Image: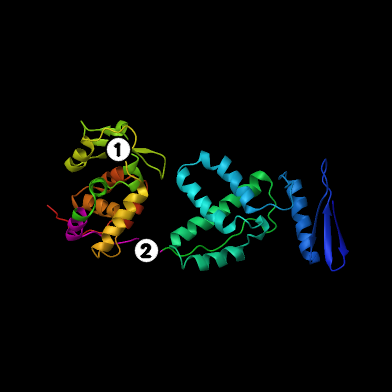
Amino acid sequence: MASIRKRGKKYQVQVRLQDASPKSKTFLTRSDAQRWAFEIERAISIGTPIATREIVTFRDVLGRYVETIVPTIKGQKQERSLCHRVDAKFGKLKVSEITASLLSGYRDARVAEVSAQTVKHEISCVRRVLRIAQAEWGIWLPQGVPVVRMPKLPAGRKRRITESEEKQLLDELPDPVKEVVCFALDTAMRRSEILDLAQDDLRLAERTCVVGDPKNGRTRVVPLTRRAASILAGKRCKSSLFNIRPDSVTQAFRRACKRLDIADLRFHDLRHEAISRLFEKGLSVPQVAAISGHQDYRMLARYVHLHRFELD
């Protein structure tokens, strides 16, 4: 049972727990004290674990999430990086301080610095950690998991590389990066998929390679053009065949674009380009999806911007 008493200008509420020390908390208003008492009693009645500490920082629950939850999910590397970013922003705060108002203010300020998609990922990560902390670890959130409107995502990019730009880039880039660019244009593979390729993934006799998809955890077989097969034919490293860091590829690509005055072109646009070229060659939606790894055919619409298509 809960009891509330006024102490000076504040209200102290105490909830007696069976087989445990009483929980108490002080509020500025009686209504807040009553609300807290009601939520604690409700949690007890439905069997929800009650937090054992009054003060819990977001860094506390985030660390537990990284240790216990992240190893069980797909895309662990990306999730760890995301957790590192949100820890820098929210780590020192108490979980009770992370409110909808705080997150909406963060959203509005952050969207001026990075893309809307990045902001969405960061806020979703915070909410995901808090939801698990409340539901499974008995962490008390006075206002529950905060609900906040996500920033509006822009329309899918329509940037395609021109023949002239492609030639200029291939002439400008160092050979290791040039190989990665050519391979991306010929296979529609993501940067991470290309750089993760190992000797055991190759089927050069069939001119294919096996790719582990980081988005859905499945594998797919990607056909290789003659150029793509020839790029891999001379590589013998059992780990990463291309033996180059992902950020080195991105930086070299970005710097080459800057030197050549090629505006608004990103490495990931090569995947868009490759998928569009597959459609221009007359492949069907299921065929392209099998190569690109898209499970939802509707997602392909974001990548397809035809320049040339000939009907027989």
Q: What element carries label 1?
A: loop
Residue 21 versus residue 115 in the image, above or below:
above
Q: Which of 61 and 242 is in front in this view?
A: 242
Residue 42 position in % (x across, y down): 75, 51
- What span is in magenta? 154-170
Q: How many marks?
A: 2
Q: Which residue is drawn at 76% across and 52% down?
A: 40
Q: Are marks 2 and 1 in contact (CB under 8 Å)?
A: no
Label 1 amino acid? Leu
Which of the numbered marks, if any, corresponds to residue 231?
none
Residue 102: image quadrant is bottom right
Q: Which residue is drawn at 31% across and 58% down?
A: 254
Residue 93 position in % (x across, y down): 64, 58
Q: List the residue tagged with mark 2.
A: 155
Q: Is residue 268 visible?
A: no
Chain-order first, disc 2 or disc 1:
2
Label 2 amino acid? Ala
Which of the numbered marks, if any, corresponds to residue 241?
1
Q: Residue at x 17, y 40 (%)?
A: 226
Q: Can residue 99 be seen in this view?
A: yes
Residue 196 position in % (x across, y down): 35, 40
* Front disc: 2 or 1: 1
